[in-house]
Amino acid sequence: MSSPPGVFFLRCLVIVALASHAEGEMYTSLQDVKQAINVERKLIEYLRTYIDSELERLEDIKRFYAKVSDLHTILYKGSAAATANPLVAFTLIKRLHSEWLNVIHSNEAQENIQTLRSKYEEEEADLPKVEDLRGAAKGLMRLQDVYSLQVSSLVKGRFQRITNGGVIDVCSPAVSVSLSGDDCFLVGKVAYEQEDYYHSVQWLEESVRLFRGTGGQWSPENEGTLEDALDHLAFSHFKTGNVSYALSLSHELLHHDPMNGRVLQNVEKYEKLLGSAGPSRECSLRRPGSSYLRTRDTYERLCLTKGSQPMHFQNPRLFCDHFTNNSPALLLQPVRREVLSLQPHVVLYHDFVTGAEAEDIKKLAQDGLKRSVVAAGEKQETADYRISKSAWLKGSESSIVGRLDHRISVLTGLNVKHPYGEFLQVVNYGIGGHYEPHFDHATSPSSPVFKLKTGNRVATFMIYLSSVEAGGSTAFIYANFSVPVVKKAAIFWWNLHRNGQGDEDTLHAGCPVLIGDKWVANKWIHEYGQEFQRRCSLNPEV
């Protein structure tokens, strides 16, 4: 299936531009995704200018066409009489020698498209890269898995799953879009390239269905075609053991491309396999297991239930109160405290910050946001199991950061000044942004946590700077409960027992954000400096 040469060049320009900047990070922060909207607005304006210029050029061509057509309709009916007039003869010769030449060899079209390309290249640095496209596709598949979403519903812009044989809405976002066959093809292709045929089959099935619905008609903005989707889907089914369906799809592909030698070979191979095999077995897609995430099932269940674990929260020993921590600063305005768990000790402080303070913190962090990293021995590196960007904020006593530090200290009774407390880390999550189960405290003596030389992280104080429509809960894996995002609230827990050993019950995760823009601020407090605030004990249970 071919495309017009000019359109093909534009597609190549986009692909080359993306490939030359493979290290993309836009997808790891919704703040960056929002900025991409402004970039596309500029591109729309550039395209509008190009269309106007092209329409003006075509109007000139239409005018020339009308002029020449009228001459042949009216003046040249009797060619002998017309050419007898030297003026008519002269204008005919001049028109054929130069006017037609100027129209046919005009550079105006090339100048118009070159202007559009130049404007595009000016914005190239702010455009998503190939890795952003892959990361966004992986984010969709992550949401599909964790929240048990139906792909057939996602392509219609709906977030649904099957429960007890019925389809229910997981959430109903205020704004949504449906996906095209090409959109689904790109998601399926990302899975296909990773040899993840569980996901590639589901997304490519939708791609083929949508492409068939358009009659296989090609659109200039598309990267894939019906033939491409059939090709990838047939091989995906073959890899999952569904050889008969792979053969059927290959025959359909040959209908569109009968001389495709590779597909002809595949058909021969599939027919031999089916001929030599016994009775066909029904093939069912199975999600690949996880070799590195042993707690995946618990983690995803806690994310899915979004804080509704009655066996945990019906504990009569859990309570809510107005908390002062015996501090004069809180006597007149105590904090609303909700004890979420006794082991590990986890507390939620409602309305810890104001809406204005949350916005100020987010604005301060925006320019410093960089891809979040995880500990890897003595070094730090990015990882697919943590999709977000973060910035570290220092603050004077009078700054908003300094005031938050003071408030944390009053509430917890701990010394949070640097280096006994780390600088405030502000985090913005990306598309399907998450942080799979992990400990905040160091579990290895070579961890970068010890670079401050103030011991391990004894406690975590995390502030929710935004709300989300769905997803994004904080799940405590071994403790078997999760906490939904509560805007302006803060959650606090101890990472270490009093004897300095890590509390394994604090294994926790940031569930993928389904709908919304999640911002949090983390304050990690270290062991040293707390000698009189939290006394040590040889007994970890004390």
Image (cartoon, grey):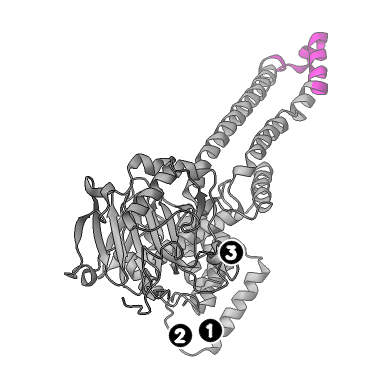
**Quick one: which residue is furthest to the front in this view?**
532
Q: Which residue lies under the disc numbered 1?
A: 274
Identify the secondary structure beneath mark 3: strand
Q: Upstream in the sequence, badge 2 or badge 3?
A: 2
Task: Report the Cα–Cα distance between label 1 and label 2.
Answer: 8 Å
Q: Amino acid at mark 1?
A: Leu
Residue under the image location 61 percent in, 75 percent down: 266
Q: Which mark is residue 246?
A: none
Identify the secondary structure beneath mark 1: helix
Q: Amino acid at mark 3?
A: Gln
Task: Verify CB contact (< 8 Å) between mark 1 and mark 2.
Answer: yes
Q: Is residue 281 magenta?
A: no
Task: Verify CB contact (< 8 Å) between mark 1 and mark 3.
Answer: no
Task: Give the magenta-colored segment's residue range.
Answer: 75-98
CA neighbours of label 2 inside 10 A, class few (<14), some (14 to 19), many (20+): few
Q: Main secondary structure of the magenta part?
A: helix
Q: Which mark is residue 280?
A: 2
Front position in the image: 527 or 149: 527
Q: Which residue lies under the disc numbered 3?
A: 380
